[in-house]
Amino acid sequence: MEPSDDIAPTRALARFARESRARDLPGPVRHEAKRAVMNWIGCAVGASRHATVEREVAALLPFVGPAQASILGRNERIDILNAALVNGTSSHTFDFDDTHLRTVIHPAGPVASALLALAEFKPCSGHDFLHALAIGIDVECRIGNAVYPSHYDVGWHITGTTGVFGAAAACGRLLELTEEQMVWALGIAATTACGLREMFGSMCKPLHVGWAARSGLTAALLAQRDFTSSEHGIEGRRAFANVLATERDYAQITDELGKRWELARNTYKPFACGIVVHPTIDGCIVLRREHRLLGDDIAGIELLVHPLVLELTGKREPKVGLEGKFSVFHCAAVAIIDGAGGVAQFSDARVLDPKVVALRNVVSAAVDPSLAEDQAVVTIMLRDGRRLTKRVEHAIGSLDHPMTDRDLEHKLHGLCDEVLGSRRSDELIAACWNLDASPNAGDLAKRAVVV
Amino acid sequence: MEPSDDIAPTRALARFARESRARDLPGPVRHEAKRAVMNWIGCAVGASRHATVEREVAALLPFVGPAQASILGRNERIDILNAALVNGTSSHTFDFDDTHLRTVIHPAGPVASALLALAEFKPCSGHDFLHALAIGIDVECRIGNAVYPSHYDVGWHITGTTGVFGAAAACGRLLELTEEQMVWALGIAATTACGLREMFGSMCKPLHVGWAARSGLTAALLAQRDFTSSEHGIEGRRAFANVLATERDYAQITDELGKRWELARNTYKPFACGIVVHPTIDGCIVLRREHRLLGDDIAGIELLVHPLVLELTGKREPKVGLEGKFSVFHCAAVAIIDGAGGVAQFSDARVLDPKVVALRNVVSAAVDPSLAEDQAVVTIMLRDGRRLTKRVEHAIGSLDHPMTDRDLEHKLHGLCDEVLGSRRSDELIAACWNLDASPNAGDLAKRAVVV
């Protein structure tokens, strides 16, 4: 790719997505792509029978197209656009997917959901698949970097709004779009970007991820037929970055493009809820383990947290499991009682459990602006008068304290064993690690469905 | 419907969409609904072979679902969601559809495209169809009223962004959603609203209309299965009106809801381009007719126009037909030479015609802030030294100078005769006027397809 100082951001990304060579993808980034795929597919399979997915599938099934692609964790085969929609939705349903910490984007969901559905229809090697995934995530996160935080502050669910670009770029790569077609694909992505933070706590939050996957794939398919858009979908006067953000920095898009990969900054969640509350859960679990706490011992819990925590997860009285994810009070209480923050801790039953409710009612939280997003201070007051304090410097799952490959395998088992059985979960894990050598990336989907 | 002062706008619209009674729709509004349908279906049929539609259909066809609904003007039958998408796109491709002048919304496209596709799948009477259409257009335009002009000024294509609400409400009505489901349908609509003005002049502009139709129909179908959203999709802190506009007036949504119908303020275009340039075209055609002008007589043309005209249609050198619609200079030149502003005047050939180019090059335009949007002053300098001036007080097609029913029939013939033949165009016109008595509104689609 020719470097150029005066190239427009949209065209720069289009050229990168078209001209990047698979062999130039650094080994560690390629490995991170496999980790991202494994984490994503586990989340999608795990949530495949959740009411969010059941209702979405029931609504769409009378209208879907040919049996081209899989619904992960299930047995229906449907057209690739609707498969991208459903798999994207399921992958975010548990709020358990990956996180690009700098922007709070969940990168894999929109991109992988579109790409794997397309790969089932238009075969490609695992090598090319991982490269296209890395491109899509790079496009998505670079656009996110350019408009974060103002874009998020305005009220946009940044995974939905930037995910559509990532899906379009990755699918456009697989479809071998020309540079001009790639510019149009990004333009169509820009004008279909959507997703409001107002929806957090409802089924629409995961819908945003599937929506972005389907819209991005649609954008690439339209552009392949020379369906035109503005050539400045990102930077134009009335385009994405100007309309959906109050500040923007295009250097974040173009600097070191093709050299620095945003995928290298990806992280994975040990807990099935929003990343901002992870330091709190981590601190609670560590204190519980170190002091063998039971909920009954505890007179009160005081949290010091980053400002976003109360903004995003300040619900005092969650009524259903989904709302529990948006209650730092529930998260702390259930982490103490169960010693975990998995899918089970965010069921309706756990949120309404009298013991959890009682402990939740003695949790207080205050903002400490000096704390980073992966930090928290948890103080527990025991009935016997003792005060136990844990300062979490880097929550488990953060860039400085990442989940290991083994941690990710364990997480996939926890998500998939009930759906696929333990043996097929092992095979799915192996298929992810071996994806680079697979002659047909689409085969991965077949290992993640119910037969 | 019980009046209530403290009901949230989203719930007010949901309750209205559910509880409005068909028999309470005033006769003139019901007649306007028929006019809107006739104008919409003519536009969709007329553009059904345009490259925009050809490319969209080619891209989507491998992935569509069962033969449930018609593509207007063509012979394919596809699933209702994709039919809504394609018919919405074709209906706006010629920029020839209806206009709610206060907001520049093109109301029928998103709503009718979704509703007719659904009516082919779930039969309903023409009486109920027209009522649901009026509801959808009311919801769409009231939300538009609440956020216009700031929403549009920010850069949103208001037909796309508000159309999705109208489609959701109309389809939700046909699907007999509960009030709560209707609230969710509007919430899903809010979080999928999209469409950037940056795309004007590309194929994405008409795509926005189809996208809104499909998204709105999807929202209603999801809500029917109890797929949840925020209950405050419009007025919530991080919801539609706060995120996509800088000013908002919710009284525009709730005042006289169910009593005053925005459909009564609908207008129809005599010219196949954006409404802002219609006074200019009207003035040119009137001067040409009154003075029997030929292009050769003319040394120069001076236009005085509303400020939006140069903002939206200021392209000096259009290169393709589509760009000609965004050039007031081309519009004036071709109106003088051809005496028309129909689809033929916005072909690539007309935009590149040397005679048109030569006349375009002597057109100048200046803003006069005292002019209303339906006003313009056209002054023509003849080679013999004479100056001819026409001040257009209300352009043809405006609320104060509406197209008659006969004008609309004539327009439909102009759009449809090449596709359907004159006899079937007559039958389509009759079917529109008789829609109120039809036992099955979906039959209308069958009259507008190629057999």
Image (tube, coloured by chain):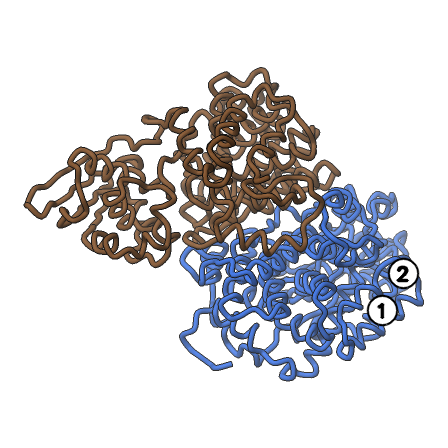
Chain colours: A brown, B blue
Give, as a three-letter code, the residue at label 1. Leu
Residue at left offset 31%, top offset 42%: A277
x and y percent of residue B106 in the render?
67, 62
Can residue B376 be seen here? The reply is: no
| Residue A240, label in figure | none
Asked whether, in this view, residue A368 is left or right of residue B84, the answer is: left
> In this figure, which residue is indicated by the disc labeled 1?
B428
The chain ID associated with circle 1 is B
In depth, the one of B160 and A255 nearer the eye is B160
- The answer to which of B261 and A118 lies nearer the viewer is A118
Do the CB atoms of the residues marked 1 and 2 lie less than 8 Å apart?
yes
Asked if marks 1 and 2 fall on the same chain, the answer is yes
Q: Residue at x 70, y 29 (%)?
A: A178
Closer to us: A130 or B7: A130
SS for callout 1:
helix
Q: Which image quadrant is residue B443 in?
A: bottom right
Crowd tier of the residue under label 1, counting other residues whose Cα lies within 10 Å: few below 14, some 14–19, many 20 or above: many
Check the image and report above or below for B424 versus B294: below
Residue at 56% x, 16% y is: A24
Q: Is residue A372 visible?
A: yes
Above or below B136: residue A80: above
Q: Relative to B188, say whether A398 is above or below.
A: above
Mark found first going from the N terminus, 1 or 2: 2
Give the residue type that dot 2 points to: Leu
Q: Viewed as shown, does residue B151 lie left or right of B398?
A: left
Q: Which residue is mark 2?
A: B420
The answer to whether A384 appears left or right of B426 in the picture is: left
**Which residue sits at x=42%, y=60%?**
B236
Whole-percent x and y of residue A191?
60, 46
